[in-house]
Image (cartoon, rainbow, N blue to C red):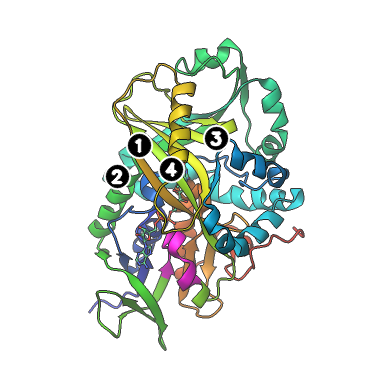
Amino acid sequence: MDHKPTVGVIGAGIVGISCALHLLRLGRKVIVLDRDRPAAGASYGNGGVLACCAVVPVMTPGVLRRAPRMLLERDAPLFLRWSYLPRLMPWLLPYLRNARRDRVERIARALTPLLYDSVAEHRALAADSAAARRIQASSYLFLYPHRAAFEADRFAWDLRAAAGFNWEVLEGGAVQECEPAITRACGCAIRLHGHGLIVSPGDYVTELAEQVVRLGGKVQRDEVVALQPRAKGVSIITRGGRADGLEVDAVVIANGAWSGPLGRRFGANVPLQSERGYHLHFRAAEGAPSMPLMYVQRKVAVTPMDGDLRFAGIVEFGGLSAGPQRAPLRMLRRTARQLLPNLRAAPPQEWLGHRPATTDSLPLLGVSPRHRRVFFACGHQHIGLTAGPKSGRLVAEMVCGREVGIPMAAYRVERGGIITTTP
Ligand SMILES: Cc1cc2nc3c(=O)[nH]c(=O)nc-3n(C[C@H](O)[C@H](O)[C@H](O)COP(=O)(O)OP(=O)(O)OC[C@H]3O[C@@H](n4cnc5c(N)ncnc54)[C@H](O)[C@@H]3O)c2cc1C
């Protein structure tokens, strides 16, 4: 008989699948449950950038002052469904309180260990699988209209410098010498080495899920509706399963922007929202750049994917159930035309997805304060593709009672969601 402990993982996005692969490698039996196919959520349509330097949260000093104007400007990256505002408020108020300089510095310090070695973590995760070929090392190019705009963004670059990143500044024609496809309206670019990208993130996570099965795990399509604590473990109650549930020794909540209800039941008191984002995906694009770009003034990531090209970005507040709006997609289309004037491709595919966003821009990683066999791996907001493999490894080590190599206090699920200013 096989007495290996079994771990249930809820959610087959990059975070859940990363947990599953690491748990299998640590000798656990694993069953992943997703109500849809693997990579049905944010892990399908993200920008594909392994953004090791993405330590700067969306909420920074001054954003509150700029937000009302941004909501009126058609090319700003912020959108709101006004009817959703009352339901957003309990999340929005603590989120805004975390925009203070000292709090943002603390968030950046806590994000750094999850991000900086992302390319190596992806390579280790995908080793021996078909997914490995989709990982590409690359530089990452941040674009500004001119040097003054870069200098006005100094706070963000100081945070990146404090996190150990360095860069080269390109000006004037040097920007187009580096990437001929970029409009001359971008007169300043910041190039960071040591980054990467994932070609077709949805296929990547699907192939990782196939690797879970190859290593002996199960990936099952079913919706988790509740968790019942038992004397020695947890029963997972699903829509399609037995009434008394599927008994496992431990469970990991990793269902992205939908983690809120189960999370609250098991002691997470960090509010979670969907930060809705969009992409345009151009197939067989001519006139594309060779490396990922960040068009800073619109916060749009542009990523070449094996001949295809993806524009991804937008922060829209509007909840999990409403469909896409046209205005954010129109903004992405204008960005594509203006940034890459010689881009030629068939009309792009459009997509809307849900970033799982906490009020302090940090994920929830660790054990439930209410049940020692329930663990969390969710809330990765804008950086889940980059940080997923590392988060999966850390949570798998915690599930198996191993020492993890970094301090985990900043990611505790009962922390409250307001960053305290003590280090
Ligand atoms: C437009 C956009 C661009 C982005 N660009 C980048 C980028 O360039 N780089 C980066 O690092 N990150 C990026 N991100 C963020 C990244 O995509 C997310 O942080 C990450 O995908 C979250 O992964 P996840 O596994 O937590 O959630 P998801 O991928 O959303 O997976 C959650 C899964 O849970 C399942 N599920 C939900 N509820 C249940 C239930 N009750 N029972 C069973 N299953 C359930 C869903 O079907 C889904 O498959 C971007 C996000 C967006 C929206």
Q: CA distance from mark 1 to mark 2?
A: 8 Å
User: Which comes before the other along the chain, label 4 or label 3?
Assistant: 3
> Depth-wise, is mark 1 or mark 4 nearer the camera?
4
Mark 4 residue's CB less than 8 Å from ligand 1: yes
Residue 257 rendering spot, x and y as whole percentages: 46, 59
Q: CA distance from mark 3 to mark 1?
A: 30 Å
Q: On the image, numbered disc 1 is attached to which residue?
A: 199
Which residue is found at the position 29% from the left and 47% from the top?
128
Is 126 left, or right, of 187 in this rendering? left
User: Which comes before the other along the chain, label 1 or label 4?
Assistant: 1
Identify which residue, 276 or 126, lies in the foreground: 276
Query: Are the residues flagged by discs 3 and 1 in contact, CB closer than 8 Å?
Result: no
Query: Are the residues flagged by discs 1 and 2 in contact, CB closer than 8 Å?
Result: yes
Which disc number belongs to residue 74?
A: 3
> Mark 3 belongs to which amino acid?
Arg
Do we see residue 291 in this rendering?
no
Which disc number belongs to residue 278?
A: 4
Which residue is found at the position 49% from the left and 71% from the top?
263
Q: Quadrant of the C terminus?
A: bottom right
Q: On the image, numbered disc 2 is attached to which residue?
A: 203
Q: Residues within 10 Å of mark 4 (few under 14, many from 20)?
A: many
Using the rendered view, name the quadrant where residue 159 is placed. Answer: top right
Extreme-top residue of the structure: 173
